[in-house]
Amino acid sequence: MSQIVISELVIYPLKSAAGIPLETARIDTFGLENDRRWMLIDEQGKMLTQRQHAKLCLLNPQLLNNQLRLNTGGFSELIVPPADTTSYHTAIVWDDHCRAYDCGEMAAEWLSDFMGIRCRLVYFPADEKRQVDTAYAETGDRTAFSDGFPILLTSQSSLDDLNQRLAQPVAMRRFRPNIVIRGATAYAEDEWQKIRFGDIDCRIVKPCSRCIMPNIDPATARIDKEPSQTLAGYRKKNNKVFFGQNLIHDQQGTLSVGMPAQIIRCAT
């Protein structure tokens, strides 16, 4: 086996919007720094994602001095003001109710115009404690507005295997990973239980079951049947389709593209 290394690092500052590729990324309490710290909620406080609103993929974020900026065709740039630490909402991610700061009327109006529905932009506070599901995690493991886990890992070899089965290959960004590795055989990550990047150990706790989002073309927001239809032919178990692995980190630190990965423990 060739050496396993990090080939891509990506954060998604606004949940369900486009990602930002990075050469280096810090891992903090919640996962990769600034990953899914902002989120759109409806008037009931429920999260808005590409599952119901595919056009979210057309929002392109930038971070300048940790300040969020959003761009998309037909709209002037939105420079999101700092979150109002005196104004709270209850933001709902699946069954979790999180305290979240409001990001102001300007952001709410801009995003409501773009989405075509009333919504607000909220920010996950540094002192908020959203516990990761203890069926897979330890007490104290935290995440921000991610679906459930701090970090998602995928393998380039696994994508290459999938693309050989597809009439039209798809890019890795369809699967929205934080860390992409290369050098392993296809789906070798299914058997890993612990992986180390430098001084950072990560527990591999759960395969990632996929929703409709990989079928959304991130360039156009068009929804198709692939790649889920093909994946279902060989990556389906208990009526769910899997691609990638959810990770929980044990230390904070810095990752970089090209950093070697060491597999510490595999399933027996």
Image: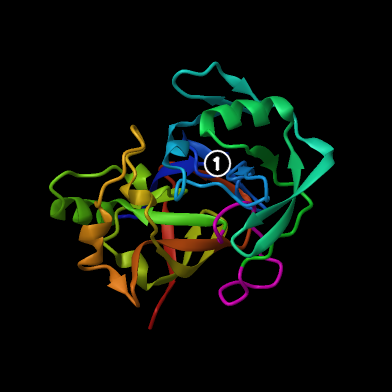
Residue at horizontal 31 percent and vertical 49 percent from the top:
215
Name the quadrant containing residue 186: bottom left
Residue 239 appears at what percent x and percent y? 33, 74
Magenta region includes residue 132: no
Mark 1 is surrounded, within 10 Å at the Cα level, by few (under 14), some (14 to 19) or many (20 or more) other residues, namely: many
Residue at horizontal 29 percent and vertical 59 percent from the top:
184
Q: Mark 1 = which residue?
A: 25
Q: Nearer the viewer, residue 136 or 156?
A: 136
Rendered position, 134 above or below 144: below
- Judge from the rendering whether residue 151 lies leftward or rightward of residue 240; answer left or right: right
Q: Nearer the viewer, residue 130 or 119?
A: 119
Query: What is the span of residues highlighted in magenta in the rendered image?
Result: 133-149
Magenta region includes residue 146: yes
**Could you tell me which quadrant the N terminus lies in?**
bottom left
Name the quadrant containing residue 265: bottom left
Residue at horizontal 59 percent and vertical 45 percent from the top:
36
Q: Nearer the viewer, residue 207 or 51?
A: 51
> How many numbered callouts?
1
**SS for dot 1:** strand
Residue 153 appears at what percent x and percent y? 43, 56
Residue 158 appears at what percent x and percent y? 27, 57
- Judge from the rendering whether residue 56 lies leftward or rightward of residue 141; answer left or right: left
Residue most extreme to the bottom = 268
Q: Which is the main secondary structure of the residues drawn in magenta?
A: loop
